[in-house]
Amino acid sequence: MEKEIVDKVLECVEVAKATGKLKKGSNEVTKAIERQTAKLVVIAKDVNPPEITMHIPLLCKEKGIACAQVPSREELGAAAGMDVATVAIAIVQEGEAKELLKHLLPRLTE
């Protein structure tokens, strides 16, 4: 994925953290996808073992939810306002990230 898109994804996460609502961690994210409350799901590429998040992109595709990958868990954790790294987050309420998401989502499905 292009750096520009990764930056936009992380920006969406930051804005949604401040003004909306996030679910963090693979279990919470999986639940948000299954309940179809997730607007955007972001997973880190450097997850070890990869099995932790392997099911997430498939589940997103099945439910028609946009899924993006970012290079590192640290970046994702920082964008979500956490002091620790995280493997996955889901934006469940966009808050002020609504406009950002509107422009971003079509680019993620390309």
Image (cartoon, rainbow, N blue to C red):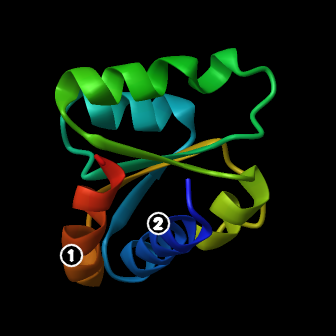
Q: Nearer the viewer, residue 41 or 30?
A: 41
Residue type, mark 1 in image: Lys
- Distance in Å between CA atoms under marks 1 and 2: 12 Å
Asked whether, in this view, residue 53 is left or right of residue 17, the answer is right
Is residue 88 at all visible to an observer of this figure?
yes
Q: Nearer the viewer, residue 45 or 33?
A: 45
Q: Helix, strand, or loop for circle 2?
A: helix
Relative to 66, residue 6 above or below: below
Q: Position of residue 71 (x, y in %)?
A: 71, 52
Q: Helix, strand, or loop for circle 1?
A: helix
Is residue 95 at all visible to an observer of this figure?
no
Where does label 2 land, which residue? 9
Which numbered tag is attached to residue 66? none
Write the residue at 50% across / 29% down: 27
Q: Within 10 Å of the Cα at label 2, are there few (<14), some (14-19), or many (20+) other Cα atoms?
A: many
Asked whether, in this view, residue 53 is left or right of residue 96, the answer is right
Q: Position of residue 10 (x, y in %)?
A: 53, 69
Q: Quadrant of residue 30?
A: top left
Relative to 12, residue 33 above or below: above
Q: Nearer the viewer, residue 23 or 63?
A: 63
Asked whether, in this view, residue 87 is left or right of residue 30, the answer is right
Would you say the residues marked 1 and 2 are in contact, meaning their CB atoms lie under 8 Å apart?
A: no
Which numbered tag is attached to residue 98? 1
Q: Nearer the viewer, mark 1 or mark 2?
A: 2
